[in-house]
Structure formats: C-alpha cells, structure tokens
Image: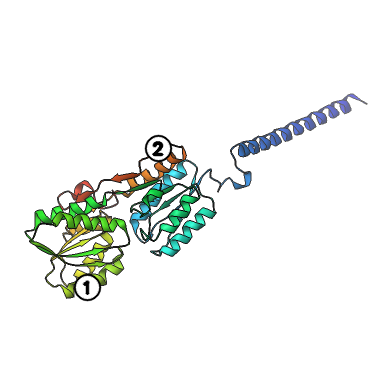
C-alpha cells in the first residue's frame, strides 16, 4: 500500500466517524425530546392538542355577546396555563344543556362552568356533576341547588335592579311601568325584584304589566309591541338586560314612540351605551363580564389546589347614564 492509498483510507475513516457522530447526535436529540414529552405526561404526536387539564363550559345561549366575553376571559386564563376549554351552546334548551353536561362528565373534565338555562330545571345535571366529584363553577346566574356547587360567580343582580329604580325615582315624579323579564333565570328574577323593592312605597309609580321575553331581542320586540297596545299610558319600561331593552326600543321605534318612554336595562353593553349616548335609553346597570370570567377561572384553580374558596363571588354593578357615559366609553365592554 502506497502513501496516497493510506492517506485516502484515513480520510474515508474520518468521514465515516463524522457521519456516525452526527447520527448519534440526532438520535440523542430525538430520545431526549421523547423523554421530555413523556415526563410531562404528553405524547409527541399530540403536542398541539394535549393539555394537562380539560374544562367544560355551557352557557344558556351564545346568542348574547355577554357570554362570549365571559367565555373568552375564562379561555384566556386557562390557555395561559396550558389547559383547554370545551364550550357548548344549548341555545336556551335546558334538556340540551343537561345532555351537554353529561357529555362533559363522560369526557372526564376537571371542572365545569355552568350558566343555567333554567335555574331549577338544571338540577339533575348539577347533582350528576357533584356525584362525579367534579368542581362546578356557576357563572352569572344562580342555580337552585347552590349547596352542590363549588362556587357561584356573578354580578350583584339585585343591586342592578335597585340602581335602575333609584335613577327613575330621581328623574321622574311618577310613572306607569312595563317590565320585561326572564323568569327561568335567577339573575333576571333578582334584577326585577330589586327594581320592585326600590319603588315599593312610592305610590306615584305603578307597575302595569310584566312579561317574559327570555332576555332575547327578537322575543322582546313583539312582547313590547303587545304591551304598548294594551297599555298606551305606559311611560317607563324596565328590562332585565340590554338585549331586552334593544327589543323594546325597536318596538318603540316601530310605534313612533322613540324617546317618549324611559327605557332601563342591565349589562352596560356596547349597544346599550350607544343608545344611552343617542338619548333614547335612560340608563343601564353595567356588568363586568371580564371580571366574572377571570374570577371564575381563577377560582377553579384554587379549588383544584385544595384551597378554601368563598361560596359566592359577587361583583358590584355600576349604573351608566348620559352623565357618566364618558367614563365607560361605548366601543366595548367594561
């Protein structure tokens, strides 16, 4: 073997060693990555979808931006921690909501957020969740079986009704009042009760009629049209939420009475604030859906960590009127 052949063999061996070293490094990296995934409880082919915790959420209807905001805020908190939220919309159907809750139990979620379609009829689902040992966070509106849930996070709904009544008492010497409510939602019941209690004893104010509209714009409008025909002397309408107030104002516009009847709502929604700015809605008791969602999400983690939590987290409402509207703006939720 001559010198050139020996040198060529040496170079070939060095190349083989280099390739072998490179393969070893790549394989080591793959093994290390796999170990990290398995150590974290994950599988490498599920990196985009796996979360340490899965939670479920079902709201009475997603046909209300208020619940979209709550859901977004809950999701933001959960996903920031690497967890996932499964959201369902029962579209105001309590039987569908019960089925959704059962689905979540079967999927083995670590916690459920419930905004009940019907605060009493949701009972069987609440009992099943409690029996399964899954934490329940009720949002925005109470459930009848409050002792079975881990926590209820909601606005001070009674206070919202009182605030609307107090404004009415300050602005008018008397009034003939129509009420739009949602009798299956405890939040709606409490708001209307707060309003009624605040005007009680003021004989110059009379409640003419109270009708259910499920808190939906498209249902509130025909209900209001019917009431206007039956009670032409009405000059005030108290609505359980801003969607109902929007339906009432649509009926007033159709009837040529825009601005002639004092309209009150609850939410402080962007649309409601726009109507206040235009002078065709008196006031709205503002809720803070971002605070509700954030508090609900933080509470579920406290429960999972074994911490003691308050049974009820109640967030105060603030009355928005033309006088203080600039503090809240009208381009989004507060």
Report, in whole angstroms, how far the alpha carbon at label 2 lies from the one at label 1: 49 Å
Outermost residue to the bottom? 229
Q: Secondary structure at mark 1?
A: helix
Q: Residue at x 10, y 57 (%)?
A: 201
Q: Residue at x 68, y 36 (%)?
A: 31
Q: Residue at x 41, y 53 (%)?
A: 114
Outermost residue to the top? 3
Residue 283 visible at all: no
Q: Is disc 2 surrounded by few (<14), some (14 to 19) or many (20+) residues within 10 Å?
A: few
Q: Is residue 98 left or right of residue 201?
A: right
Q: Which mark is residue 308?
A: 2
First in residue order: circle 2 vs circle 1: 1
Q: Secondary structure at mark 2?
A: loop
Indicate whether 181 appears above or below 76: below
Q: Residue at x 17, y 48 (%)?
A: 324
Quarter of the image for residue 236 reads: bottom left
Q: Is residue 270 left or right of residue 299?
A: left
Q: Nearer the viewer, residue 59 or 182?
A: 182
Q: Is residue 85 left or right of residue 327?
A: right
Residue 161 picture location, percent across and down? 21, 54
Q: Is disc 1 surrounded by few (<14), some (14 to 19) or many (20+) residues within 10 Å?
A: some
Quarter of the image for residue 76 reads: top left
Residue 254 picture location, percent across and down? 21, 72
Residue 16 picture location, percent across and down? 79, 32
Outermost residue to the right? 1
Residue 204 visible at all: yes
Evaluate if marks 2 and 1 touch, with contact meaning CB atoms under 8 Å apart: no
Residue that badge 1 annotates: 225
Indicate whether 107 appears above or below 221: above
Residue 206 picture location, percent across and down? 12, 64
């Amino acid at each position: 073997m001559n010198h050139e052949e020996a040198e060529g063999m040496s170079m070939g061996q060095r190349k083989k060693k280099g390739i072998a070293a490179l393969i070893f490094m790549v394989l080591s990296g793959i093994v290390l990555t796999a170990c990290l995934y398995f150590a974290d409880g994950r599988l490498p082919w599920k990196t985009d979808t796996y979360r340490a915790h899965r939670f479920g959420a079902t709201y009475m209807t997603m046909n209300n931006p208020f619940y979209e905001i709550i859901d977004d805020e809950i999701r933001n908190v959960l996903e920031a921690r690497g967890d996932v939220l499964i959201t369902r919309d029962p579209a105001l159907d309590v039987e569908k909501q019960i089925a959704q809750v059962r689905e979540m139990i079967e999927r083995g979620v670590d916690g459920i957020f419930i905004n009940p379609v019907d605060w009493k009829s949701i009972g069987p689902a609440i009992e099943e969740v409690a029996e399964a040992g899954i934490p329940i966070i009720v949002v925005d509106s109470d459930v009848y079986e409050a002792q079975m849930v881990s926590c209820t996070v909601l606005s001070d709904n009674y206070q919202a009704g009182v605030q609307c009544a107090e404004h009415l008492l300050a602005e008018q010497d008397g009034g003939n009042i129509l009420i739009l409510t949602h009798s299956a939602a405890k939040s709606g019941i409490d708001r209307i009760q707060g309003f009624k209690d605040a005007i009680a004893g003021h004989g110059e104010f009379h409640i003419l009629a109270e009708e259910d509209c499920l808190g939906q714009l498209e249902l509130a409008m025909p209900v209001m049209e019917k009431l206007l025909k039956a009670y032409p002397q009405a000059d005030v309408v108290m609505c359980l939420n801003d969607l109902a107030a929007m339906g009432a104002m649509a009926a007033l516009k159709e009837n040529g009475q825009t601005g002639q009847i004092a309209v009150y709502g609850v939410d402080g929604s962007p649309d409601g604030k726009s109507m206040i700015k235009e002078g065709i809605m008196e006031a709205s008791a503002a809720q803070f859906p971002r605070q509700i969602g954030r508090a609900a999400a933080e509470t579920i983690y406290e429960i999972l960590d074994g911490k003691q939590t308050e049974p009820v987290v109640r967030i105060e409402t603030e009355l928005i009127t033309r006088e203080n509207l600039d503090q809240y703006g009208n381009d989004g939720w507060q």
